[in-house]
Image: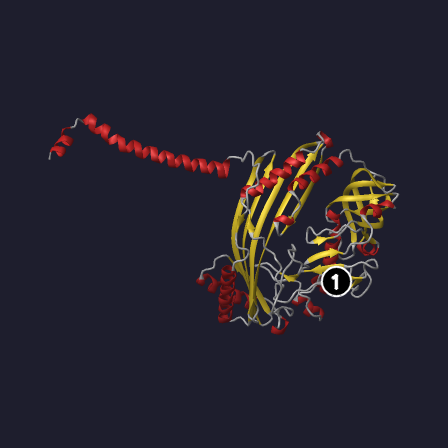
């Protein structure tokens, strides 16, 4: 009672002061929470990371997730059952789930930090000789049931395609190799930023470099699962790292830009970050004060960073769809000499840690290593099921696809076997010629083989790189270029379509 009376006997001023104490404490607590949130927001989103001198350690995670694989396969099995229930004669489905981190660093500060996670699912159904494809990222049971019904309704409404369908059970892959396609370490964003900083610092330290376009790094991991009504079910994971740097040398109208990059499944297999930067810087400085040589016929040497493009021209020309349509300059060359004698082009989808490796193709067929070119002779087309049926040939296990389209042929890890001469000896016999380090545009006619592209690099005089050149066009025909190709001995697996230094004689160089 006394205490109660004492409370009652307090003056209004004392009551007000007493009530303010807990309010002030609450206000301070709220301010502290807000300050922490603002500070965290500034560090993560707005405030540039000023200096990352030590490489933050990557986070160790499991290399493969059986639960993810099982969940993906189970979802696809349910979807195939829904398609059958909706009236499909046959069907196949593809599930893709992935995570990606990308960062950028420019002029000593962070420029970009992004992380994305997503999943997608594609269903292809067949009703007789009609097919339809649908995709979704809504994996609820009702949404997938609706998806199957919509796909079947679409298939019934489209014209017939005599070449559509899925593989026979005896054509399917039943086992496949482990290809070591996932680095068990997931990098932190700070670690990737530190790689960028190291690369850019090394590039900017090169004498003559005046500006930077920055350094970019990325990491990704994806899970792929395929299920079909013919009994196929398979899943695998793959991941990879990348790092690049691009800088500018010179000033005003005399500026030149160049770059270097590296990518690999495992971080430890990438080029050192400082080396990436130094190479980019030295290349940019070496391009300063370019000249434009006179036009004429000359030997042309392709640097390894552009020589792999020749393999892309080859695989485009032997793609089964182009052959079936008759739109390839090699359409009548199967079993004939198309490359110089002694040359070999290898397609190896089973290379351990390969950037284009895969255990089976997008139609569930086995993949295998094969020589596309053997002793200069074209040995095969790249065929998925549809192009194989159209050409009345056996499929080669080259189908690839996304979730919203049908399969089409594509190669695995491509390489042109190295020759015996070093790059220096390959160039030594050239009195006057062009060494290409960069190509511009895509002036290649897949029907005729005509080739014409913008180029820059260095002019060769008496077997040595004499001075930088730019503003050139190189022209020829791929049929002749393939036959007059000489590879050096410096093959490095870097991009998934790799060739050593290449020399091609008798090309037209258009300058001044």
Camera-side residue of 397 and 6: 6
Location of residue 383 by image quarter: bottom right
Is residue 508 in view? no
Q: Nearer the viewer, residue 298 or 305?
A: 305
Residue 424 in the image, given as x and y percentages of width and height: 82, 45
The way the protein has been coloured in the rendering is: secondary structure
Other-residue count near label 1 (Cα within 10 Å), few / some / many at <14 / 14–19 / ≥20: some
Please tell me which residue is depicted at 56% across the width and 34% down the height of the picture.
Answer: 51
Q: Is residue 411 above or below residue 185?
A: below
Which one is nearer the viewer's eye here, 90 or 373?
A: 373
Q: Position of residue 130 (x, y in %)?
A: 59, 69
Task: Classify 285 as above or below 242.
Answer: above
Residue 495 picture location, percent across and down: 68, 51
Element assignment for label 1:
strand
Query: In this view of the protein, can residue 172 be seen by the observer?
Result: yes
Residue at the disc numbered 1: 371
In this rendering, position of residue 58 left or right of residue 368: left
Quadrant housing residue 311: bottom right
Q: Nearer the viewer, residue 500 or 381?
A: 500
Q: Is residue 261 left or right of residue 223?
A: right
Across the whole image, how many numbered discs are drawn on residues? 1
User: Picture coordinates of residue 452 (x, y %)?
Assistant: 78, 48
Q: Quadrant of residue 438?
A: top right
The residue under the point 57% across, 38% down is 54
Q: Residue furthest left?
A: 1
- Quarter holding the N terminus? top left
195, above or below 27, in the image: below
Q: Is residue 101 left or right of residue 211?
A: left
The image quadrant where one finds the C terminus is: top right
């Amino acid at each position: 009672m006394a205490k109660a009376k004492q409370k009652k006997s307090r003056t209004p001023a004392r009551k007000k002061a007493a009530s303010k104490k807990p309010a002030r404490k609450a206000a301070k607590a709220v301010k502290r929470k807000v300050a922490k949130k603002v500070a965290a927001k500034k560090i993560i989103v707005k405030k540039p990371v000023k200096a990352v001198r030590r490489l933050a350690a990557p986070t160790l995670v499991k290399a493969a997730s059986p639960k993810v694989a099982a969940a993906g396969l189970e979802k696809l099995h349910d979807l195939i059952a829904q398609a059958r229930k909706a009236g499909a004669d046959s069907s196949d489905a593809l599930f893709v789930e992935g995570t990606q981190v990308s960062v950028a660093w420019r002029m000593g500060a962070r420029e970009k930090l992004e992380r994305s996670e997503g999943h997608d699912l594609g269903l292809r159904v067949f009703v007789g000789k009609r097919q339809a494809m649908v995709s979704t990222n809504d994996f609820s049971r009702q949404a997938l049931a609706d998806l199957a019904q919509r796909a079947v309704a679409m298939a019934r409404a489209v014209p017939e395609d005599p070449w559509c369908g899925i593989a026979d059970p005896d054509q399917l892959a039943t086992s496949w190799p482990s290809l070591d396609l996932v680095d068990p370490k997931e990098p932190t964003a700070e670690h990737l930023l530190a790689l960028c900083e190291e690369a850019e610092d090394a590039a900017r330290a090169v004498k003559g470099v005046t500006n930077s376009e920055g350094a970019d790094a990325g990491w990704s991991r994806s899970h792929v699962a395929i299920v079909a009504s013919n009994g196929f079910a398979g899943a695998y994971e793959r991941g990879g790292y990348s790092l690049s740097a691009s800088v500018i040398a010179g000033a005003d109208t005399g500026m030149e830009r160049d770059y270097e990059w590296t990518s690999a499944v495992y971080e430890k297999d990438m080029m050192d970050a400082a080396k990436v930067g130094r190479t980019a810087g030295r290349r940019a400085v070496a391009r300063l004060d370019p000249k434009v040589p006179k036009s004429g016929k000359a030997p042309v040497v392709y640097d390894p960073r552009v020589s792999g493009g020749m393999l892309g021209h080859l695989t485009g020309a032997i793609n089964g769809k182009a052959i079936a349509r008759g739109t390839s300059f090699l359409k009548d060359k199967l079993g004939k000499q198309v490359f110089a004698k002694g040359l070999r082009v290898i397609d190896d989808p089973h290379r351990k840690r390969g950037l284009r490796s895969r255990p089976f193709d997008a139609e569930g067929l086995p993949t295998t290593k094969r020589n596309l070119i053997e002793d200069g002779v074209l040995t095969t087309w790249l065929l998925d099921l549809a192009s194989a049926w159209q050409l009345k040939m056996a499929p080669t296990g080259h189908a690839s696809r996304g979730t919203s389209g049908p399969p089409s042929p594509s190669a695995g890890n491509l390489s042109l076997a190295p020759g015996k001469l070093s790059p220096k000896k390959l160039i030594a016999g050239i009195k006057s010629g062009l060494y290409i380090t960069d190509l511009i545009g895509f002036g290649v006619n897949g029907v005729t083989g005509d080739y014409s592209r913008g180029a820059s690099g260095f002019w060769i005089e008496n077997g040595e790189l004499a001075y930088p050149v730019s503003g050139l066009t190189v022209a020829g025909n791929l049929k002749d270029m393939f036959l007059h190709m000489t590879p050096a001995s410096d093959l490095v697996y870097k991009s998934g379509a790799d060739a050593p230094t290449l020399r091609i004689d008798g090309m037209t160089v258009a300058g001044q």
